[in-house]
Image (tube, rainbow, N blue to C red):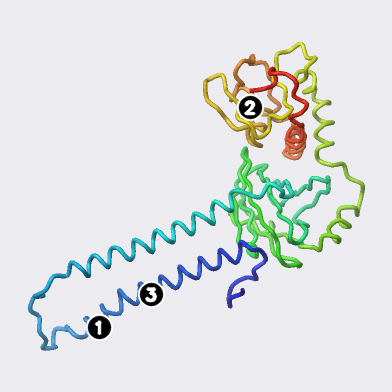
Amino acid sequence: MSFPFFPASGSAMATQVDRLFLFLVALTIVVHLIVFGPMIFFLFKYRESKKVDRSPLKFSTLKVELVWIIIPLILVMAVFAWGSHLYVNLQEPPKEAIEVNVVGKQWMWKIQHPEGNREINELHVPVGSVVKLVMTSQDVIHSFFLPVFRIKQDVLPGRYTTEWFQATKVGSYHLFCAEYCGTMHSHMIGRVHVMEPKDYEDWLREGEPTEPLVQSGQKLFQELGCSGCHSMQSQFHAPLLEGIFGRPVPLEEGRMVMADEKYIRDSILLPQLQIAAGYPNIMPSFEGRLSEEEIFQLVAYIKNLSPKKAKSGKGKP
């Protein structure tokens, strides 16, 4: 379904967003007609020079007032439920999604695929597949905006935000930064290329040989000496990381946190912020020593550690 003056619809979610938007426009028009139509009519009917009956009403208006309260209430709650349903769907990508990492910086989008392919201001995706974007900023607040897919998400320094889409049409579409991020903000324009699955596979194999993200993370994990502490043979009392991603972690202060991308990132850069219960505060900070791309690689490696490798309760939160 397409509408005049709307950008092309390139995803299933875009159609749903358009329907909600058009419903709101239609509802606004109807409410304005109901409110302003009688106002204009009575404005002329009861103008000062007109001789009409101006005596007070001789009947109760309770039923009219109840109808005027109940019907708008039902409509507002219906719009709230509809919008909430769409919002929740946008916040929960399907599990089988292809994860693509995005780093915003003045003034470009740096994108890396799980197979290792890197792009700047370009994003190649297969049509029909769910793509989840895990995003962060290297400097200031940016906003990743894909009008064709009707999605826009702020990209913040020090945090991970996500959004997802499932492209339905092959083509090349605009990518914008929708947050004024500096004097050259307008340079953050890119393209999203939606390809047939076979063409996408061919594109992944083109260019210089690249190392998968998980493999890069594993090398970095060993080079930084992380494996020296987070292993069964370590003399230091540090948590094992196998299977930790996606599980709740008890903290020394008594709280529980979910081991998601943000928790792992904070544990690398700000280890004193959330100390796992039962472990000493000995983790050094790697803040300033790693780029956002390298942090993505470490996170990808830790996420990929199979829970089957966890052999003792020492690594369990």
Q: Pointer 3 and pointer 1: residues touching (CB < 8 Å)?
A: no
Decide if residue 153 is on the left or right side of residue 118.
left
Kindly report which numbered mark, 3 or 1, lies closer to the viewer in this rendering: 3
Task: Judge by depth and name the residue closer to the eye, 113 or 137.
Answer: 113
Residue type at mark 2: give it: Leu
In the image, farthest residue toward the top:
235
Find disc 3 in the rendering and name its residue: 30
In which quadrant will I find the C terminus?
top right
Kindly report which numbered mark, 3 or 2, lies closer to the viewer in this rendering: 3
Kindly report which numbered mark, 2 or 1, lies closer to the viewer in this rendering: 1
Q: Secondary structure at mark 2?
A: loop
Q: Quadrant of residue 145?
A: bottom right
Task: Judge by depth and name the residue closer to the eye, 45 or 89.
Answer: 89
Residue type at mark 3: give it: Val
Q: Give the label on residue 110, or none.
A: none
Neighbour class for label 3 at 10 Å: few (<14), some, many (≥20)?
few
Q: Give the label on residue 270, or none.
A: 2
Q: Position of residue 177 (x, y in %)?
A: 64, 56
From this viewpoint, is residue 105 visible?
A: no
Residue type at mark 1: give it: Phe
Who comes first in sequence, dot 3 or dot 1? Answer: 3
